[in-house]
Image: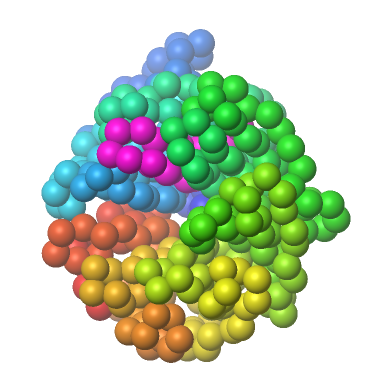
Amino acid sequence: MKFNALLLSLAAVVAVPLVAATGVGQAPAASYFSSAPHLINPEKAPIYAATTAGRRIVAVGDYGLINLSDDGKTFRQAKVPTRAPLTSVFFVDEHRGWAVGHDGTVLGSSDGGENWLVLREMRGQDQVLMSVWFENAEHGLAVGQFGLALETHDGGKTWAERSLVAGEAGEGHLLQLVPAGNGVLLVAGEAGSILRSVDAGAHWVAIQTDNKGSFWTGAALADGSVLMAGMRGHVYRSVDHGEHWAEVPSGTQQSLTGISQRPDGSVRIVGLSGASLLSKDGGQHFSASLRPDRAGLTAIAQAAGGDLLFTALGALFRESF
């Protein structure tokens, strides 16, 4: 299971005191789930995923929290009409974006993440969406636990469930959608499986790597190669748009949660217990280190002046390596 699901219990311990401090805990039951709590210190919110909308950083996490930063230094909360934990966020441009999470929740924004609408919600049902991706403003996919896959052709207004592949690979947890260019779309899966489509998600095949653990995160690099990483520090690389994969020694056994390519072309992978990997040759080799504070890193985004890291205890500002 992906790291953000495992961290929910820790995040709840952190967030509950912050919520109580605002008095939101006294809200009537009927309206309790209709908005995210207002936090005194949003930069300390538990974050599970982050992306960019133009130059803006958009980070999502527990209790429906969505934090925005325009300078990579300070955060403010967006207006969010749910308390469902959010696990993934994606923008096609600086204005239009979507976020997904627990309870089958899908949110949409048309103003760079300032305001959000509930596009889909299955409250009380065991539906956990783990990743969302849009090809354009109309066509998108969302995937999650136990093979859950949803597709939209109208910008998220309506969603239809579908099966991507038959067998165990299609029934296991689908943890991250990874666009790899030229219509190639990949899904990081359980037990070393990777789902691959060459037509933007219309048809899929399952690829079984020799990895015994789950892939949690992936990213396409500027040179056309693709990286997948996950449990126990495993990193795999493909140079043919995800058709074949080879393991790259990572130098760590810590599970890995996020990948980012910097403006200078170097690649950084972060993970639990403060794990941090750096490659200066497009992911062919990595040097590994552990942060002294052993902070469990959940996401990484590029901010002016350095890497912006996220944890279940909030943001770590302008980190370099």
Is 43 magenta? The answer is no
What x and y, as percent, mark residue 210?
72, 80
Question: In the displayed structure, would residue 233 be above or below residue 257?
Answer: below
Horizontal relation, residue 41 to residue 146: left or right: left
Horizontal relation, residue 17 to residue 239: left or right: left
Horizontal relation, residue 195 to residue 18: left or right: right
Question: In the displayed structure, would residue 139 be above or below residue 249?
Answer: above
Residue beneath the point at 58% across and 29% down: 153
Work out whether residue 106 can be spotted: yes
What x and y, as percent, mark residue 191?
72, 68
Residue sitting at the far right: 167
Is 94 magenta? The answer is yes
What x and y, as percent, mark residue 163?
77, 43
Task: Tell me the quarter of the image containing the N terminus.
Answer: bottom right
Residue beneath the point at 67% across and 64% down: 194
What x and y, as percent, mark residue 69?
21, 44
Which region shows up in magenta? 86-104
Residue beneath the point at 46% across and 38% down: 136
Horizontal relation, residue 35 to residue 248: left or right: left
Q: How is the image coloured?
A: rainbow
Which of the 4 image quadrants contains residue 68? top left
Task: Tell me the quarter of the image containing the C terminus.
Answer: bottom left
Question: In the displayed structure, would residue 198 be above or below residue 285?
Answer: above
